[in-house]
Image (tube, rainbow, N blue to C red):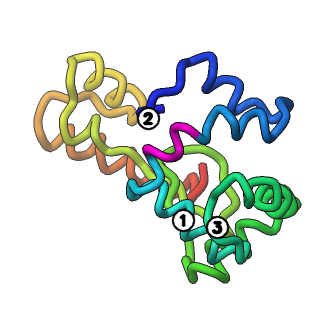
Amino acid sequence: MSAGPSAEEFQMVIDPKAPLMERWDMVEPYWGFARRTGYSRAHDISVTELYGIDGIHRSTISRLNDEFLKTLNGGQYQRVPKENCRIRVGILDSNLDCDQKYFRSTVHADAFIYPRTRNDLLRASKEAGVPVSSFDDWFEVCTKAMEGAFVRGPCA
């Protein structure tokens, strides 16, 4: 996006129903500007390491797409993070349901560290069932919230 495609072009590029080479034709001029950035280099390196394809180019895009689509059979989390990268578990910055074999969800404590409004305090107080009139009360609210997160588990 930062290299310059319009919003309309971008929507076409991400449309999986649009023909691949038409989408590549829209990306290619911008890819030339972006390909030496850290993000794009990471893609080129990944393509080589994961699929044995020498980078992202017009001559490789069809084969790369075919190889990528083959990974969507459900084995990509096992192959890439676990086997290729030797990552034991990925941390999701959310409280969404997730497959505990591969992920753990974070608990955001920002509202406890830095409550922004009185309503933040009242909401947390109500959820914990502890009226807040002192720092010790607030500490109890925070403790109950964290304990609740542990009870719900790593992907709740």
Q: Nearer the viewer, mark 1 or mark 2?
A: 2
Task: Give the mark nearer the N terminus: 1 vs 2.
Answer: 2
- Circles 3, 1 touching at the beta carbon (< 8 Å): no
- According to the picture, the residue beneath numbered tag 2 turns out to be 3
Q: Secondary structure at mark 3?
A: helix
Name the residue type under label 1: Gly
Residue 109 part of the magenta segment: no
Q: Is residue 52 above or below residue 3?
A: below
Q: Which residue is mark 3?
A: 47
N-term-proximal mark, 3 vs 2: 2
Tell me the CA gap for discs 3 and 1. 21 Å
> Closer to the N terminus: mark 3 or mark 1?
3
What residue is at 82 percent from the left and 61 percent from the top? 63
Q: Position of residue 150 (x, y in %)?
A: 48, 58
- x and y, in percent, of residue 116 in the image: 20, 24
What segment is highlighted magenta in the picture?
A: 29-33
Please tell me whether mark 3 or mark 1 is closer to you in this view: 3
Main SS, magenta residues: helix
Relative horizontal placement of residue 146, taking residue 85 as reference (left or right) = left
Q: Amino acid at mark 3?
A: Val
Neighbour tally class for label 2: few under 14, some 14-19, many 20 plus, Cα within 10 Å:
few
Q: Is residue 7 above or below residue 30?
A: above
